[in-house]
Amino acid sequence: MPPFDTDILIVGAGAAGLTLALDLARRGVDFRLIERNASPFPGSRGKGLQPRSLEVFEDLGVLADLQAVGGPYPTVVTYEGGQAARTQVHEVAPPTPAEPYGNPLMVPQFQTEAVLRRHLAAAGHAPAFATELTGFEQDADGVTARLHTPEGEVTVRARYLVGTDGGRSFVRHALDIGFPGETLPFRAVIGDMPIAGLGFDAWHRWYTPDAQLALCPLAGTDLFQMVAQVADEVTPTWDLVRDLVRTRTGRDDLVVGRPTWLSTLRVNLRLADRYRVGRVFIAGDAAHVHPPTGGQGLNTSVQDAYNLGWKLAAVLRGAPDTLLDSYEAERRPIAAHVLGLSGRLLGQMGQAEGMRRGRETRELDLTYRGGPLAPDGRPNAGESGRVRAGDRAPDAPCLAANGTHTRLFDVYQGPHFTLLGYGVDAATLATAARPGVKTLTVAPQGSGQAADLVDEGGHIRDGYDLAAGTLLLVRPDGYIAALSQDAGAIRDTLDQWLGLTTSA
């Protein structure tokens, strides 16, 4: 076979593809990222980053820039029958030691992707736009892909191919993966535009059962996102938008500026039958499509990529291929759950009060318990709230050995696995570790033990329900790999699932 041109070919430079590329870049994995469109997506179809995604983006080093261009969600003002009622979209949740980001952050999708591209450029990479995958074949060693580029037809040989190419995914179709689900009768015109005369401090919603209009101010811009329900297929135009705004608001004083982006919206709930065929994977909208309600689609896509990236890197460095099977086993049930949630929330949109969103949309409670990397993660009777293998690893403030304040998320940040020894001496911790795993001893509150971290305030103990003598292994994607007082069990986890017998 011809030599490899790259390790990973990523097809599609949306949020999922960019997240995967950033994660691979920090791991030193060679990849190419291609996008068939000639330029970046200009719109705000996804505009909410859930708290779990904020944690992902903190780990990737991009959160501060997202916070700089985003902002909090505004309150909702619903106009119905001449009355106006103001409500909160999300139940306000203050940050806690275990959950530093209680509330979603509004960032228009085009801004999110622009931030990711800037960080990718700083790492020496960029998407190849106007580059389309036209076909591929795979064999036991790799994938041979045919690309149409501005310079002509080229062939690229990669060890793996990942399709993050959207709901109409060429990769999924080429693999003949089923995409069952349903297309709902809801139709809408969606787009971004300036609107003079409308208050920017509220998400305005004019409610009638079959002709809703929502105008949401987009944080960090002077634009509103418009979603206008329509009964029939229409061609979205500036004139149509102006007419919809005028007739549904009943106001002639609003001046609708030229849209920066317009499209039609059909609501699909679909989930791919498979996420992997040999050396080819699908992620993001290529694997699952959601209604926009609840802000789940983009977030689920980002977390797909975050789950897959470290596993690809580990296998390229010698971990068993079966680790890659855990991607579908962990992420597909999550998508199924989120599809159900999105569908329920869409149904609530048919109610005047149907804009409220609770904790379930924040994605902090999603778990991989009982999956291939946490087969013993199922709770015992009476322990349903206990943190176990497969759960998200909570944050916790603590002290470094020199007395400065730090957090577990600071310790976890980076492409490595982390092994904490809670009330465990350094020698015992060393017997459990493997090369490439970051190890730190943790002194319980008041123990007086010399350690790398001190659990001042007991937040680590409380967040993880830890007893002294416990070893805690955390995966690179911020989920718990193992909790045990047996160093041998930790070593077995690393050897069996992660293959870390050499440096990661």
Image (tube, rainbow, N blue to C red):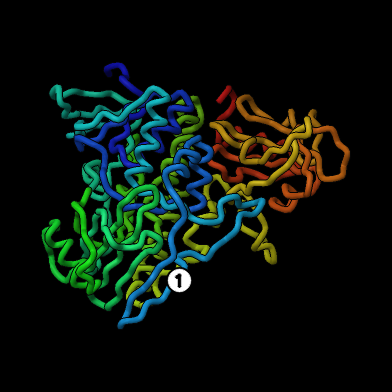
- 62 or 271, which is in the foreground? 62
State whether residue 353 is above or below residue 129.
Answer: below
Q: Residue furthest top?
A: 3
146 shown above or below 380: above
Residue 311: image location, x then y, percent: 47, 35
Label 1 neighbour load within 10 Å: few <14, some 14-19, many 20+: some
In the foreground, 259 or 136: 259
Using the image as rendered, state which of residue 10 and residue 227 is in the foreground: 227
Query: Which quarter of the rendering shows the N terminus?
Result: top left
The answer to whether any part of residue 252 appears in the image is: yes
Residue at (71% x, 36% y) in the render: 488
- Residue 29, compared with residue 395, is above or below; it is above
Specify the quadrant that holds the C terminus: top right
Q: Which residue is mark 1?
A: 87
- Residue 86 on image: x %, y %: 43, 72
Looking at the image, which residue is at 32% across and 41% down?
14
Disc 1 marks a residue whose amino acid type is Thr
Name the spot of residue 93 as percent of width and height, x first.
Answer: 57, 61
Identified at 44% across, 36% down, the residue is: 309
**Does residue 384 appear to the left or right of 169 in the view shown?**
right
Snapshot quadrant of residue 420: top right
Q: Residue at x 78, y 32 (%)?
A: 401
Asked which quadrant contains residue 12, the reply is top left
Secondary element under disc 1, as helix, strand or loop, is strand
Q: Residue furthest bottom?
A: 81
